Amino acid sequence: MWRPDRVERALAAFDARPELQMVCSDARLVGADGVSLGTTLFASLSIGPHERDGIRAGDAFGVLLRRNLVTGATAMLRREVFDAAVPFPSPWVHDEWLAIVAASRGPIELLDEPLVDYRQHGANQIGIVEPTLAYKISRLMQPGRQRNRDIADRVAGLASWLDDTREPAPLADRSAVVAKAAFERFRADLAPARWRRILPVVLRAPRGEYQRYASQGALDIVRDLLQPA
């Protein structure tokens, strides 16, 4: 459910900064009955000041390469972004792909205002889960190798798009894209036995790749050590 000034606020952001490629906002999370759940989309995504500062400093591509922060229902983008993004590659969720394409072309803006109500009703195709400590611990114990393979495939597809596209992508860092794909393949290929993962993970951690490319940063070191195969 859009707030009455949702479009007006996004258009104002574009008018103020003609170089913007995409504008997305926070959202109030509500239940199936429309009653507030007491939190917001950005809070549930645990968007931190480092990520906000990176986007505002013009490094949205680097931030979104690490993890997606854009929810399509809150976004407005320039037509040129859509034209550059189609056809959507199948491994990507549409809003993630539009966001990374937008960030490759120019700056994006996060509006901290909750301009929409985002209903959580139990049948959401994606939905939002509150990032409680119990949830984070449960994620540590879920198998994640296929997820890493899927991410590596998506990012490899992004590298191919950058090579093939005739659209401008001046802010894309192809070397970081290739490094992210290689890092996710490393994670996907870790041994099933936990004790055999210790040495490769400990040797890899000082390179800073977990901080640059893993969605949960240093917490993903623990995940790679503890997750079942």
Image: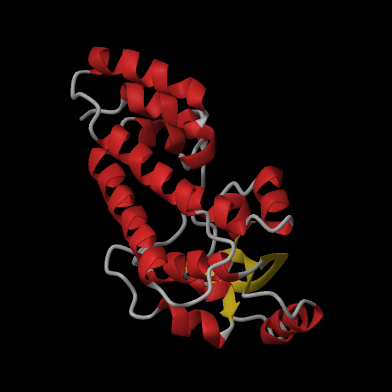
Task: Look at the picture and state if 113 lies above or below 217.
Answer: below
Quadrant including the C terminus: top left
Q: Position of residue 124 (x, y in %)?
A: 37, 67
| Left or right relative to 219: residue 116 | right
Q: Is residue 111 above or below residue 128?
A: below
Q: How is the image coloured?
A: secondary structure
Asked whether the viewer can see residue 41, the reply is yes
Q: Quadrant of the N terminus?
A: bottom right
- Residue 159: x, y in percent? 38, 58
Query: Is 194 above or below relative to 90?
Result: above
Which residue is drawn at the image coordinates 33% and 79% (left, top)? 87
Q: Is residue 30 above or below residue 183?
A: below
Quadrant in the rendering for residue 190: top left
Q: Quadrant of residue 146?
A: top left
Q: Is residue 124 visible?
A: no
**Observer-nearest residue: 94 or 184?**
184
- Residue at coordinates 68% horizontally, 81% vertically from top-left? 6
- Name, please, the residue furthest toward the right: 16
Q: Position of residue 107 (x, y in %)?
A: 66, 67
Q: How many marks?
A: 0
Which residue is rendered at x = 49% and y = 64% of the image? 100
| Viewer-nearest residue: 145 or 204 | 204
Which residue is at a point 61% across and 81% down the rendered structure image? 2
In this rendering, position of residue 185 left or right of residue 223: left
Query: Residue 7 appears at what percent x and percent y?
Result: 67, 85
Does residue 40 appear to the left or right of 213 in the view shown? right
Q: Quadrant of residue 189?
A: top left
Q: Nearer the viewer, residue 135 or 221?
A: 221
